[in-house]
Image: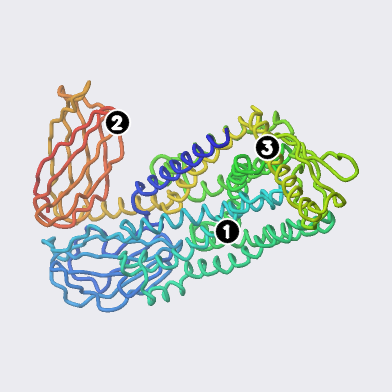
Amino acid sequence: MTQTIAPRVRTLVLLLLAAACALLAGAGPASAHAAVTGSDPGQGAVVDKAPARITLTFSEQVALSDDSLRVLDPEGKRVDTAEPANVSGTTYAVPLHSGLPDGTYTVAYQVVSADSHPVAGAYTFSIGAPSKTSVSVSGQSTDDGVVGWLYGFGRYVSYAGFIVMTGGAAFVLACWRRGSGVRPVQRFVVSGWVALTASTLALLLLRGSFTGSGKVSDIFDLSLLGQVLQTKSGAALVSRLLLLAAAALFIAVLFGAYDKREDAEEKRDLTFGLSIGGVVVAAGLAASWAMSEHASVGLQAGIAMPVDVLHLLAVAAWLGGLGALLVALYRAPADTPVDAPAVRRFSQVAFGSVLALIATGTYQSWRQLGSWSAFTDTRYGQLLLAKIALVVVLVGVAWISRRWTGQLAETVPVEASAVREKERVGAGAESAGDADIAAVGDGEASVKGEGGEAPVKGEGEGDSGLGTDEHPDSERAAQLARQQAARDAARQKRMRDADPNRFGLRRSVLAEAGIAVVLLAVTTVLTQTEPGRTEQEAKAATSASASSSADTGASGALTLNMPFDTGGEDGKGIVTIDVDPARVGGNEMHVYVERPNGRAFDIPEVKVEFTLKAKDIGPLPVVPDHIATGHWSANGVQIPMAGDWQVDVTVRTSDIDEVTVSKNAQIG
């Protein structure tokens, strides 16, 4: 049965990994974790005279390079005169040439937020009056290409490696010390160390390109690597590598000297020492994430970082231990099966880890979201809801595993029944299974096996038998003993696998591991997503900027009426798009959906895209927020330049019925 289950296990794990990778690939680019909360001049503003400098205010401190802030005139030429600098707190400025002519200018920024993620974007303002511009602001982000995908995948592998290595070692020390001598468990823990080490080296190489140009050719640029080593993220990655050297020594002792130690008191002392050392190394590795990412910035950073370390350790103890248990249940040899007490001890560890995750996760959610509305109104909140749902499902399956654990019968290990081959001539072989050596007279013995009796000459019988017949018969007895031992082991394994409680535990733990793989993928995407609190603050700032600039700009709202028919039930109607003031810069957009009789009604989804084909700009997607029945709205819709824009509206009236309608309009 084990031979048929093992391929299924491998297939299921590969499918789950593929699903996790697809989730990572399909999750859009990693959103900036710092956001522009203010600018002078504001987005879409029209000023009477040229400003002396451009200032940008971010939600947190950012790292600047020489080209972090660029200001381009309508022809695309740079008009900034010096490197950007920090003027106060989270506000940064770049000086401009004096006497700039009237027209629309583009401000492009590319910085690195305090939590290590790249931030890129652009906006426009005008001097005197808006004008045409040759600057395209699309494709500003550098983390949505091959390098961005590789960096995201590297982060996933690093998290997985940490969980496997830390949780697997904790499972051996805290739950199943006999597992230190089980080869599959050893390979499981070592593979975690290898994955974490390789991914950390890869992240070091990718970091320069990820936060800069985004080009594959820059991955092996040593000058960029030198710059990375001077940043907080680079220091965290180097610290992680140093701690991994200590982790390698820990693993070597755990699967070497510790496994061979037989004295109970010495082994107890070594267990205590390894436990203390392992916790210190694991906490240090977890801190390499906490000190360079979300927890290191924002509210209560001094509290958030140790909470984040505890959160990561709890995740590793639960999910990594779960993986080690799965390996033990499926791959442990018949003479060293994982026993019921070990499973029960892990159940207690997992329960404590879940309690720690609930406490730390609640604090992190409050810190990153700030309001209940952020759960549904921000991408971070939506991903967090998905993560919470997966954790709830995982806890439910774990409860089922706990029930199987309570019913699991103790399995008696296979006793050593193999007879070792004797190296010295004259040593007798012990009986094993169906083969035994029976005495026949004073100087003769016979080996009883499945094929009958074979006489064995003693030392004193016959000249021809002296020193020649004894050694082959001893080898034959040892061979039969090894065969019988193998049969005993196979029979014991079949009996163990036939235990319905153990089989049920296997299946439930396998289901837990599958959910854990997807949960880890969602968590990785979550760490690359802009926190809900920051996103809402940025939206509020953009809305205020758009409202203030609307009073100073050119007016003239644009209204487009587009009939649609999705072909499904209740699929006909009219969608109306209002863009105000329909100019270059920030605009306010309203979407109304009505039935053919003019009555407003709601539909599951409506999306809008703007495309300027003449300049190869777009599509620029806009997802408006639902305001009232049949009414959606979006503030701060950026139109980078004037022209004949194609407005595409996608209307979905059911799970499968949708249609896209289009109209062209002059904007700006």
Q: Compare residues 365 and 242 and report the one nearer the observer.
A: 242
Task: Return the x and y of residue 110 as percentages of the image width and height.
Answer: 32, 65
Residue 432 can be seen, yes or no: yes
Q: Secondary structure at mark 2?
A: loop
Residue 433 makes an appearance in the image? no
Q: Earlier in the sequence, mark 3 or mark 2?
A: 3
Q: CA distance from mark 3 to mark 1?
A: 46 Å
Which of the two marks, 2 or 1, is nearer to us in this view?
A: 1
Relative to 33, is 578 on the left or the right?
left
- Given residues 120 and 448, the one toward you in this image is 448
Q: Are marks 3 and 1 in contact (CB under 8 Å)?
A: no
Residue 331 placed where, x, y %? Answer: 61, 43
Q: Nearer the viewer, residue 323 or 32?
A: 323
**For mark 2, what is the residue?**
604
Name the one closer to the observer, 657 or 37.
657
Q: Earlier in the sequence, mark 3 or mark 1?
A: 1
Residue type, numbered disc 3: Arg
Q: Residue furthest front?
A: 463
Q: On the image, numbered disc 3 is attached to which residue?
A: 487
> Label 2 sits on what residue type?
Pro
Crowding at dot 1, Cα within 10 Å, few <14 / some 14-19 / many 20+, comes out as: many
Q: Residue at x 36, y 53 (%)?
A: 538
The residue positioned 85% from the left and 56% from the top of the image is 265
Secondary structure of the residue carrying tag 3 is helix
- Give the residue at mark 1: 286
x, y percentage for residue 610?
18, 47
Distance from label 3 to label 2 (Cα)? 63 Å
| Figure check: 352 above or below 165 | above
Q: Is residue 407 left or right of residue 196?
A: right
